[in-house]
Image (spheres, helix red, strand yellow):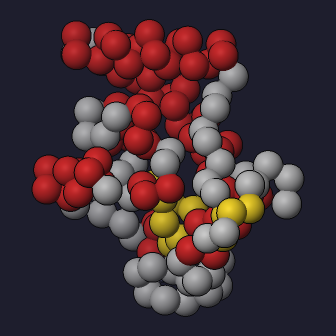
């Protein structure tokens, strides 16, 4: 499969590499997030969401995550209509729960069916959970 490096252990996860122009803007907004300007936070979120959604829709990204999760929803175990989902979401990233670097890494992505994804609570995260992801 194009873009996927095959290793002894299976497949190496592709690296999220936004276009340089997008990356420059994201890094600029990211550095300014601590200023707590809602306009900057909104711009950051919108741009990051577009870039991250495109990344997790990639065929090679889907293949690696779905293979790892046995082509089933990690929540309800069904294999129908599964999607790649950010465990700690893009919005959480805009709110400082996860770093820009870690958002699109393999250990923050999971296979989730459309139904479980839609019913995922938006405020279920705990700092403990975030630390586990960051230290993984
Ligand atoms: Zn499910």
Give the quadrant of residue 79. Answer: bottom right
Residue 91, x across and y down, in percent: 37, 40
In this rendering, the answer to whether 111 lies above or below 90 is below
Q: How many labels does the image show?
A: 0
Closest to the observer, 39 or 60: 60
Could you tell me residue 60's position as x and y percent?
74, 57
Residue drawn at point x = 53 percent, y = 71 percent = 111
Horizontally, is 27 left or right of 37 in the view?
Answer: right
User: How far across and down, in percent of the image, does residue 92 sit?
Assistant: 32, 42
Q: Residue furthest front?
A: 8
Q: Residue at x 26, y 51 (%)?
A: 135
Note whether residue 123 is visible.
no
User: Of residues 68 and 29, which is closer to you in this image?
Assistant: 68
Decide if residue 108 is in sight here: yes
**Quarter of the view holding residue 50:** top right
Picture quarter with the C terminus? bottom left
Q: Say whether residue 102 is left or right of residue 3.
A: left
Vertical position of residue 6 compared to residue 77: above or below: above
Q: In this view, does 96 lie above or below 125?
A: above
What's the residue at 59%, 66% (across, down)? 65
Pinpoint residue 32: horizontal percent, then vertical percent. Answer: 32, 11
The N terminus sits in image quarter = bottom right
Q: Residue at x 66, y 16 (%)?
A: 20
For residue 56, side relative to residue 45 (left or right)? right
Looking at the image, the residue that sits furthest to the right is 2
Vertical placement of residue 46 versus 102, above or below: above
In this orientation, which residue lies closer to the viewer: 108 or 33?
108
């Amino acid at each position: 499969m194009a873009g996927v490096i095959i290793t002894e252990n299976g497949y190496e996860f592709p690296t999220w590499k936004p276009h340089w122009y997008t990356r420059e803007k994201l890094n600029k907004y990211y550095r300014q997030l601590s200023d707590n300007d809602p306009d900057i936070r909104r711009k950051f979120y919108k741009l990051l969401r577009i870039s991250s959604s495109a990344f997790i829709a990639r065929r090679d990204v889907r293949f690696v995550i779905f293979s790892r999760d046995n082509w089933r929803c990690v929540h309800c175990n069904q294999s129908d209509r599964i999607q790649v989902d950010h465990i700690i979401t893009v919005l959480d990233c805009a709110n400082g729960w996860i770093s820009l670097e870690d958002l699109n890494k393999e250990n923050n992505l999971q296979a989730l069916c459309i139904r479980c994804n839609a019913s995922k609570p938006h405020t279920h995260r705990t700092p403990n959970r975030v630390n586990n992801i960051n230290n993984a």
